Amino acid sequence: MPKPVKLDCRHVWKLYGQGAEQFLAANPAPTLDAVNEAGLIGAVRDVSVQIQEGEIFVIMGLSGSGKSTLVRCLSRLVEPTAGEIQFDGRDLLQASEAELIEIRRKKMGMVFQQFALLPHLTVLQNAAFPLDVQGIDRATREARAQEVIDLVGLKGREKNYPRELSGGQQQRVGIARSLAVEPDLWFLDEPFSALDPLIRREMQDEFLRLQALLHKTIVFITHDFDEAIRLADRIAVMKDGAIEQIATPEDLVLTPATDYVAEFTRHVSRAKVVRARSLMAPLSDGPFAGDVPADATIEDIAAAVEAADRPHRIIADGQPIGVLPRQAVIDVLVGRA
């Protein structure tokens, strides 16, 4: 059964330049060449996407592809030139400024690449700051801030100031601050890109742990494909302000919709995206070497499968659904599949 749609974005445009609205009114579906010839910049072009409740939806592309502008349009930090954005069935483009402020304060969380912590406030005070803005009393806001500080693994650092923390710890404070308001929708714009590789991996682990606990609806921007395939339920690839393809990481790599997506994913290891379910043979009698989850990637299970002299059963929802042939796994690992 499909999940409910949390954020429904239809035919959203963001053109920069004089006369952009009049141009779109006269040319409802202009090509990129037409936009350029009109002296306009097509930052976001005719984007439609439905983001489901509880999913991690990753938007990726090269620098200048429009991914950050799109996210700012979705939260109306940037005003779209045209289109419709429904959040929980409500058209955000029709909301007043006061209504938008209330929505952002209570229903949206945002984390950006720059930590933007307030240097004169402690970890606890930084995490509690959004609640302070809402006028929530000190005892209540600090109790909630302590909860999210514990959640992101910073217990014991409550009285530290940002300058006393590492980059990864500062980003955890930013995450805690965005979670303090218990948002329905969480935007993260390249939150880990400024971190060292080891810390970045640690933060990805932390992010996945938090999502397993909280089940937030997340829009996550990155230009790192390895990060995208590790985190995403679905990925949208952008180019020149438009979406080239929306798909699961596996489908994106195995069945690219355009030459651009094919080139974009060409060097991605198939073992990182192909899941056991995709290599499944019909269920048969044992004996078996063991069980593997249907959604496990080949990279995660390759060592156990290669070392075994018997096939593994594939398990979904606690029930065996098929068999994972050892040779099929080897074919993926060596690039034959």
Image (cartoon, grey):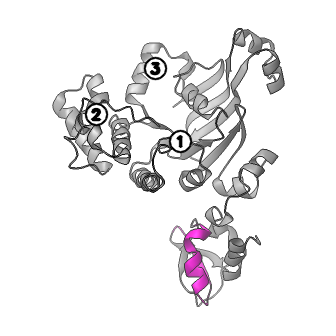
Expressed as whole percent of the image width and height from the top left, the position of residue 32 reads 80, 26
Upstream in sequence: badge 3 or badge 1: 3
| x 64%, y 78%: residue | 324
> What secondary structure is marked by label 1?
strand
Amino acid type, mark 3: Leu
- Residue 277 is left or right of residue 3, and the answer is right
Within 10 Å of disc 1 (Cα), the crowding (few <14, some 14-19, many 20+) is many
Upstream in sequence: badge 3 or badge 2: 3
Q: Nearer the viewer, mark 3 or mark 2?
A: 2
| x 76%, y 55%: residue | 255
Q: Nearer the viewer, mark 3 or mark 1?
A: 1
Distance between the alpha carbons at the discs numbered 1 and 2: 22 Å
| x 74%, y 17%: residue | 40
Expressed as whole percent of the image width and height from the top left, the position of residue 285 reads 63, 88
Does the rendering let one see residue 1? no
Within 10 Å of disc 3 (Cα), the crowding (few <14, some 14-19, many 20+) is some
Q: Quickly name the residue at label 1.
A: 220
Amino acid type, mark 2: Asn
- Give the camera-side residue of 321 and 303: 303
| Quadrant, the C terminus | bottom right
- Give the camera-side residue of 200 and 46: 200
* Residue 306 within the magenta-colored segment of the rendering: yes
Q: Which mark is residue 100?
A: 3
Q: Quickly name the residue at label 2.
A: 126
Q: Nearer the viewer, mark 1 or mark 2?
A: 2
Distance between the alpha carbons at the discs numbered 3 and 1: 21 Å
Upstream in sequence: badge 1 or badge 2: 2
Magenta region? 297-317
Task: Tell me: residue 337, above or below residue 304.
Answer: above
Within 10 Å of disc 2 (Cα), the crowding (few <14, some 14-19, many 20+) is many
Amino acid type, mark 1: Phe
Expressed as whole percent of the image width and height from the top left, the position of residue 20 reads 71, 13
